[in-house]
Image (spheres, grey):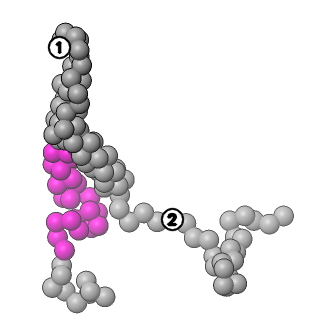
Amino acid sequence: MTDISRIDVADSHSERAVARPTVYVYEAPVRLWHWINALVILALIATGYLIGSPLPTVAGEASQHFVMGYIRFAHFTAGQILAIGFLLRGYWAFVGNDHSRQIYYVPIWRASFWK
């Protein structure tokens, strides 16, 4: 019986490579912040387009058709989520690991940064 965790994996050049565990450099809050920002920015783009180029009007009572109000509400909600995420990201730069500070502190004057 072969131990699965010690099996060597062959690549396309017939060299032997060892399967290694995944190491996450950025902590979970930073990765979550990134993906929330991506989704929120997409929502801001879509709703901003619809606000700038409104849908055709619908016949009937205005109180029964509140589509643009919902689109505007979604736009403002996405903007608030983006603003709160920015504040939380600033907080995490102080309490997170060294990699979480990279967005605010990039030592470009050090030779080790360029290597």
On the image, the x and y values in percent for residue 42 come to 29, 47
On the image, the x and y values in percent for residue 83 come to 15, 45
According to the image, label 2 marks what residue?
22
Is residue 36 among the parts visible in the rendering? no
Asked which quadrant contains residue 93, the reply is: bottom left
What predominant SS class does the magenta segment belong to?
A: helix
> Is residue 87 depicted above or below 56 in this figure?
below
The segment highlighted magenta reads 81-106
Image side of residue 77 versus residue 14, left or right: left
Q: Around disc 1, counting alpha carbons within 10 Å, would you say few (fewer than 14), some (14 to 19), or many (20 or more)?
A: few
According to the image, label 1 marks what residue?
62
Q: Residue furthest top?
A: 61
Residue depicted at 72% across the width and 71% down the height: 7
Q: Secondary structure at mark 1?
A: helix
Number of the front mark, 1 or 2: 1
Question: Could you say which is closer to the camera, residue 44 or residue 37?
Answer: 44
Q: Secondary structure at mark 2?
A: loop
* Quarter occupied by the C terminus: bottom left
Residue depicted at 18% across the width and 81% down the height: 108
Residue depicted at 70% across the width and 70% down the height: 6
The amino acid sitting under disc 1 is Ala
On the image, the x and y values in percent for residue 52 come to 15, 40
Q: Is residue 87 magenta?
A: yes
Q: Is residue 98 magenta?
A: yes
* Quarter occupied by the N terminus: bottom right
How far separated are the C-alphas under marks 1 and 2? 55 Å
The amino acid sitting under disc 2 is Thr
> Is residue 85 depicted above or below 63 in this figure?
below
User: Which label belongs to residue 8?
Assistant: none
Residue depicted at 35% across the width and 55% down the height: 31
